[in-house]
Image (cartoon, grey):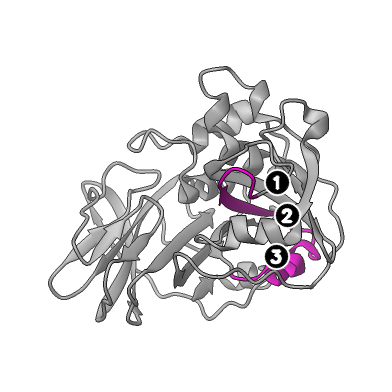
Amino acid sequence: MRFASADIASRYPLPIDDQLSWSSSSDGAGNLHRVELPIPELPKGYILVPSFSMIGSGGDYGFQFTLATPKRTWALAPIGTDTLRAENPGKRLATHIDYFQASRATGDLRLTLDVVSARPPERYLLTVAARPVEMPPQTGERTSRRLAVAPLSQLTAPRNIRSHICSPTCVTMVLRHHGVTTHIGEIAPLCYHARCGMFGVWPAALHAASRFGAIGAVETFSSTDVAAGIIDQDIPVIASIRHAAGELAGACNDRTSGHLVVCTGWTADQVYVNDSRARDPRDVCTSFARAEFARAWLGHRGASYVILPPQ
């Protein structure tokens, strides 16, 4: 499901369902704006990945997603605010910072988004994706143009953070491609989630990009063809990958339980990427076998950032 204001919907490269009606209230924590969505039954082994981004509406904002049945509520980590509730994992569903995961089939679900901001969201993008956490990837066959995304290496950053900032580095490359003047030293602190102690929290990356007027979403794909279509609209796709030793030939990491790269183009049998883990910036722009990359990306979660250029 995707919901967006009309101006964002007209530019987003994937279908938008509708706009949202917000309810608003004010208390000691500030102005709270809420929307609730019914969620179809979540089968066992499925993940539910919500994301939110907005620009304008009075400056800074924070938000949090909660998922509830009539008897239980689960909450993801709040983004951009400390005034909302803490995480509350349960038995039927687990929270994984970025998403919910069902340990057994769970129905009668309702997703709530609480936004803390000066005014109700006016220019926004809300997405809710569901898929099996593990699934056979669709290698696809669609080809695309190749985007010239200037390379950045995360290993040029200070030693204490350089191994942890693939997400901020990818966001920096995409923002620069979209004409934003910025650098890793500016983006990394904005991506850092203090409560989790991590730079790689997916919704925090989108929150950081929105500070520069670039709205975006976390999408979960099952086929490379969708990403190829987005790249043809001059929008690089940031992909979250994981692989064991020897499963992705030519990768800077021999193995990884989680790493992000920027997809810049597709041929019939190759994918071009910017891999920030390259020690030399000249080696950041590289390519992988399409089928191997599809397994590393789409076989587990298939998570991606899709970030629009600022208007």
Q: Quadrant of residue 281?
A: top right
On screen, residue 75 above or below 259: below
On screen, residue 98 above or below 246: below
Residue 19 point in image, percent of width and height: 50, 76
Q: Nearer the viewer, residue 51 or 253?
A: 253
Disc number for residue 236:
2
Residue 26 highlighted magenta (yes or no): no
Let me know if residue 11 appears in the view: no
Residue 140 point in image, percent of width and height: 72, 72
Magenta-drawn segment: 222-247
Q: Quadrant of residue 82?
A: top left
Earlier sequence position, callout 3 versus callout 2: 3
Earlier sequence position, callout 2 versus callout 1: 1
On screen, residue 205 above or below 225: above
Given the image, on which type of amino acid does mark 1 rest? Val
Dividing the image into 4 quarters, which one contains the C terminus?
A: bottom right
How many numbered circles does the render carry?
Answer: 3
At label 2, counting other C-alpha atoms closer than 10 Å, the crowd grade (few under 14, some 14-19, many 20 or more) is: many
